[in-house]
Image (cartoon, helix red, strand yellow):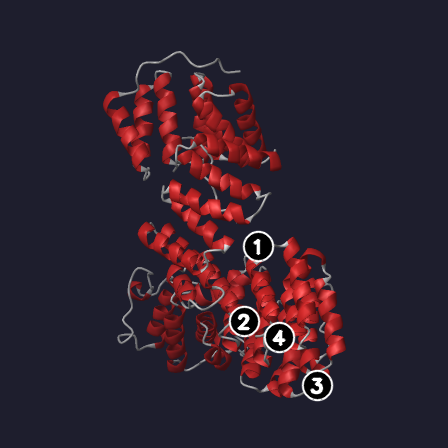
Amino acid sequence: MGRMKLRLLLPAVAPLLFAAACATTEPMGADPALRGSQDVPFDPGAQTSPYGLFLAGKAAMNDGRSAEASAFFDRARAASIDDSGEFGDRAFVAAILAGDIPAAGRLAPTGDDSQLVLKRLGALTKVALAIGEGRGKEAQALLATGEVGAPHRAAAALLGPWAAAAAGDKEGAVVRPEVGGDRLVDVFGQLGQALLFERAKRYDEAETDYKALIGLGDAGVLFIPDYGGFLERRGRWKEAADLYATALAKYPRDEGLQAAAARAKARKGAPALPTVRQGAARALVAPAASLVGERAHEMGLAYLQMALYLDPKRDDARVMLGDVHVAMKNTDAARAAYESIGPKSSQYATARSKLAWTYQTAKDNETALRMAREGYEAAPTSDEASINYADLLRANDRYAESAKIMDAVIARAGESPDWRLLYMRGVALERSDRWPEAERDLEQALKQQPDEPELLNYLGYSWIDRGERLGEAMDMVRRAVAANPKSGAMIDSLGWAYYRLGDYRNAVERLEEAVLLEPADPEINNHLGDAYWRVGRKIEAEFQWNRALGLEPTEAIRKDVEAKLKSGLPPLKPPAVAAN
């Protein structure tokens, strides 16, 4: 059926970093046997020359095997007469992307032949390494040289107070960092100052900072656990409980707040104040998240690896690491990151859910569902885990089970569930042939979001497909297309609506447009074949049906197409109504 595919509802220097590890630099006249095709495996034992090791490292990096690449590049650098320049740069990049921060610190580029962006990242790496090894004065001295320049000024500023703390510089540790106009440094610098004031037992000043952070409008919720933890550590349990209760009134399904509220109510188990290493790790996670949000994936990956070196228990950073690897299409590395998070972690359900999608994308549906179920069973009241499991069930045509999971999610949401939840359940119910219930959910969702194109498209098409409320439904589908004129799926819905109404000329026109936008969609190609048949273009119809068969259709579409290729479409019946 021609509906919109339901989606799961829930800086410029980066290319230089990855290019330093992956760029092809062989001269045009080089021996073809040494040109390093990515398809040719390298035998580590057979590669003994610097250039052979270099090519092996490049092939490993191209395949996303950063740890192997690091070893190859390091051996190439050691075997070369000159251990600086390209060999050294690539060895450093491979080491940091693999998370081997001690090796990356040792290999940090310093020579004149090295790229400036890598020398600056290398300096930042050495700062993180020095903090991690308790060499705070060395970290402070390196920051003072200015070698950690753009684009790392925010990270350097946020690490500065923690370097001072590691050096025993009590006054330097509580100086709030500043980078002109950088809001991230302003906010997370104040968080670092609050934590370091607390470490220095300057509690009044710490509390002033914590209160300022929770007063940052909607963003303030991020820092409720920090201020609440401070209150708990001070034995101010009732104040902490009241703080969490106030936040939960606005964010009732926030699982972190729920856990904190339960802890405060029990008056035991206050979260420990972060160590210097842990504080420095958190200082790096914030700019890492910013870089990832800007799609600077390689640089964000480097920051995350430094953060995990400083605090291996930061599972939120480990989840983000997996996300970056997914974005970089390094599936094995992404799975390794997600799988490294154990069942006792608060991030386990999230990691399992994300792991499931790596298998779904690879068409290993059985494993995907098992992983999603494990995440759901580990946290059955988690909306995130439940929604993810329901969405995977839907993606695998297990609609009744998906609807049942969404029943519990919507029940927990109270009297006014979010429209996205109603939409998800409505789709599952409709696909389970429970139309009256589905219609109720979809109409309720549309009342919340009357201009939402996906809702307009899905509900409007559903009515057309059933021959109900045709004028209203056609108007809804047209509004959806007007809002998303480049959506092949929505234009397919409009074209199929014309088809169902017997307006085959307009159906062909719209479905041809949809196929141009979504040429690999088997359903749209199937629809266009039907429209061609109805206007007498039977050779073209058979071409489109055959094309649909070659595009991995669902079993239902495959059976439908095979029957039409054998016997064509049945004779026309009078349309339900003339198209407008």
Alpha carbon distance from label 3 to label 1: 40 Å
The residue that mark 2 highlights is 118
Callout 3–callout 2 Cβ contact below 8 Å: no
Q: Which residue does the image show at 59% across and 80% down from the upper left? A: 275
Q: Is residue 194 visible?
A: yes
Work out whether residue 257 or residue 354 is closer to the camera in this orientation and state it.
Answer: 257
Callout 4–callout 1 Cβ contact below 8 Å: no
Q: Is residue 405 above or below residue 308?
A: above
Kindly state the secondary structure of the residue where label 4 is placed. Answer: loop
Alpha carbon distance from label 2 to label 4: 10 Å
Work out whether residue 26 or residue 453 is closer to the camera in this orientation and state it.
Answer: 453
Disc sitting over residue 263 in the figure: none
Label whose residue precedes the other's in the sequence (4 or 1): 4
Kindly state the secondary structure of the residue where label 2 is placed. Answer: helix
The type of residue carrying mark 1 is Arg
The residue that mark 4 highlights is 148
Few, some or many C-alpha atoms within 10 Å of disc 2 (few <14, some 14-19, many ≥20)?
Answer: many
Kindly state the secondary structure of the residue where label 1 is placed. Answer: loop
Q: In the orientation shown, which residue stands out farthest toward the left?
A: 566
Label whose residue precedes the other's in the sequence (3 or 1): 3
Alpha carbon distance from label 2 to label 1: 43 Å
The type of residue carrying mark 3 is Lys
Alpha carbon distance from label 4 to label 1: 41 Å
Q: Quadrant of the N terminus?
A: top left
The residue that mark 3 highlights is 170
Give the image location of residue 422, x and y in percent.
Answer: 52, 40
Kindly state the secondary structure of the residue where label 3 is placed. Answer: helix
The type of residue carrying mark 4 is Val
Q: Which residue does the image show at 51% across and 78% down from the upper left? A: 108
The residue that mark 1 highlights is 253
Give the image location of residue 369, x and y in percent.
Answer: 36, 52
Q: Which residue does the image show at 51% across and 61% down from the upper left? A: 297
